[in-house]
Amino acid sequence: MEKETKSGSVAQVVALANRMLALKASPGFHDLRLLAEMLEREAAVAARDFPGFDPQEIVTLKVQSQTAHKVLAELFGRIDAAIANARGLPGFQQEQPGEPLITERIAGSY
């Protein structure tokens, strides 16, 4: 019988962590993070620099800014947490700093 962890079976936890490592190793992951941070900054600037005095619009912009920040923190936090949950479990593919996890990809195939 498969061992259970707080997040599911060991195989499920390891599989998720390995997929998250592959995602972080993807050439587009850094671009995704930059785009997400750019959208978060734009929402914060829109709330901060709103030229009007309509309280409803100000509240809407503030909520959008807070939501963007919270979603990004949760998304990237959960990716890191999935990887951290699998550390030390059998079958977990350890991160190699600076080395891509996917080495058999043909250039331009992503």
Image: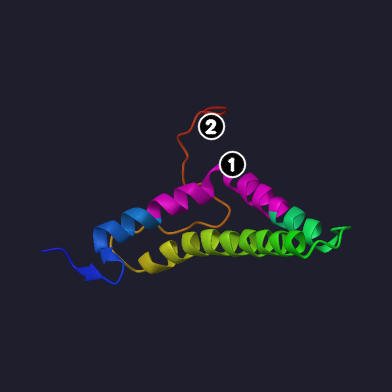
Residue highlighted by disc 1: 28
The earlier-in-sequence mark between 1 and 2 is 1
Extreme residue toward the left, this view: 1
Percent coordinates x, y for residue 42 in the rendering: 76, 53
Of residue 110 and residue 91, the one placed in the foreground of this image is 110
Q: How is the image coloured?
A: rainbow
Mark 2, secondary structure of its residue: loop
Q: Is residue 22 magenta?
A: yes
Residue located 87% across and 58% down the image: 52
Residue 88 sits inside the magenta stretch: no
Cα separation between marks 1 and 2:
8 Å
Q: Mark 2 is on which residue type?
A: Tyr
Query: What residue appears at the point 77 percent right and 65 percent down from the top-left corner?
Result: 55
Horizontally, residue 108 falls left or right of residue 16, namely right
Q: Nearer the viewer, residue 91 or 28?
A: 28
On the question of residue 88 being in view, the answer is yes
- Residue that badge 2 annotates: 110
Q: Amino acid at mark 1?
A: Gly
Which residue is rendered at x = 73% and y = 59% of the image? 61
Q: Is residue 35 left or right of residue 3?
A: right
Quarter assignment of residue 88: bottom left
* Quarter placement of the N terminus: bottom left
**How dense is the environment of label 2, judged by Cα within 10 Å: few (below 14), some, or many (20 and up)?**
few
Q: Secondary structure at mark 1?
A: helix
